[in-house]
Image: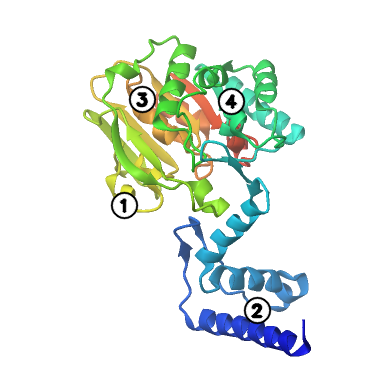
Amino acid sequence: MSKKFSIFLTVLFCAFIGCMSVVSLLLPDREFSPLENRNLQKPPKLSVENLGSGKFMEDAEDYVSDHIVGRDFWVAAKAWSERLSGKKENNGVYFAAQDTLINRIDTPDPAKLNRDMGYVDALVGNVDVPVYFGLIPSAAEIWQDRLPAGAPKADEEGIIEQLYFSTGASTIDLYGTLEAHSGEDIYYRTDHHWTSLGAFYGANAIFEALGLEPIRVEDYQKTTVTEAFNGTLFSSSGVRWLPPDAIDAYVPDEGIKVTSYFKGTPEQGSLYVDSYLEVKDKYSYFLGGRQPLCVVEKEGSVGPKVLLIRDSYSDSLTPFLTERFSEIHLFDPRDNLTSVKNYVEENNIDAVIVLYSFANFVTDTNLFILGR
């Protein structure tokens, strides 16, 4: 390479970086990235403390990265380059077989698991109603045949078995139920949640644990409400070349009363919120998304009242639960730190179900509320 050509490339590269920087500075900041489904970094705050700790430079780097012109293109380009280089993972998401994206689930901290199971058992001792405990295995476990060869993953089956053996709560066999249907579309390909079909099987596992009659999928008319769902793994992986998922609904919402507590005060809700089908976060079609508390009542039902201490997997599960429970009180510890014991007593709850996806259970930091 000649010296002149080297100088030319250097000048061209500097001009490119300069233009990108100028345009990025001139464009208005975005607060949220729909494609990545997350809030973008705000301008760094200059202070002596932030400068001394290095936080100012960290925030500045994140801010520049988040607001560079054409960011969505560069995120996708990175994922493409990772794939073309032979890598099977990007940002903790595996490029799996059958056009599937699967979250990497690492082996959890045993000390944290022991501590959290202590909270579950404390709940068993604190309330005078039956307590049931269920962990929903991830797609990395049930669809492990789709993972790249040699991809590391947690031994979810073994860990769940060990936790079930150690607890004083009654357990729900979600692992065996979902494994029996591993050849079906029980998880989304671009999202970490189970599909409505997976939730159907999960509901029957709960009914079986509580001694209730199962429901039959043949008794429902499946309705596909969208075929353009690009979920959380689409967002975090940068992968833009896979076909989107479909979202299905089975249970009609007639005779169902939903009370949502998005901001701590009751407001009328719904099993299904159609407006979310027009935005990126289409999974929030179920119940309207994350909320501290949601109470779902089935008109004329004589079934038990249950308190479901849960994560977002229960959003798509709840429609099926209305078939056997008269009231479902959905309690999300991420935003609701009130006493579980008091709630059970004040609302005449018949049974408590602690139901989490495996990935959320091993990382949740609010399980201490179970012992309150």
Q: Secondary structure at mark 2?
A: loop
Query: In the rendered image of this protein, does residue 229 appear above or below residue 211?
Result: below
**Mark 1, residue position:** 278
Q: Which mark is residue 320?
A: 3
Residues tagged 2 and 1 counted as in contact (Cβ below 8 A):
no
Identify which residue, 223 or 2, lies in the foreground: 2
Lower sequence index among marks 2 and 1: 2
Identify which residue, 278 or 309, lies in the foreground: 278
Quadrant for the C terminus, please.
top right
Query: In the rendered image of this protein, does residue 22 appear above or below residue 186?
Result: below
Residue at far left of view: 254
Does the image show residue 354?
A: yes
Of the residues tagged 3 and 1, which is closer to the observer?
A: 1
Residue 171 image offset from top left, x and y in percent: 57, 17
Q: Secondary structure at mark 1?
A: helix
**From mark 2 to mark 1, how far is it between C-alphas?**
39 Å
Q: Which mark is residue 46?
A: 2
**Mark 4, residue position:** 123
Query: In the rendered image of this protein, does residue 287 appear above or below residue 170?
Result: below
Amino acid type, callout 3? Phe
Q: Count the marks: how many?
A: 4
Lower sequence index among marks 4 and 3: 4
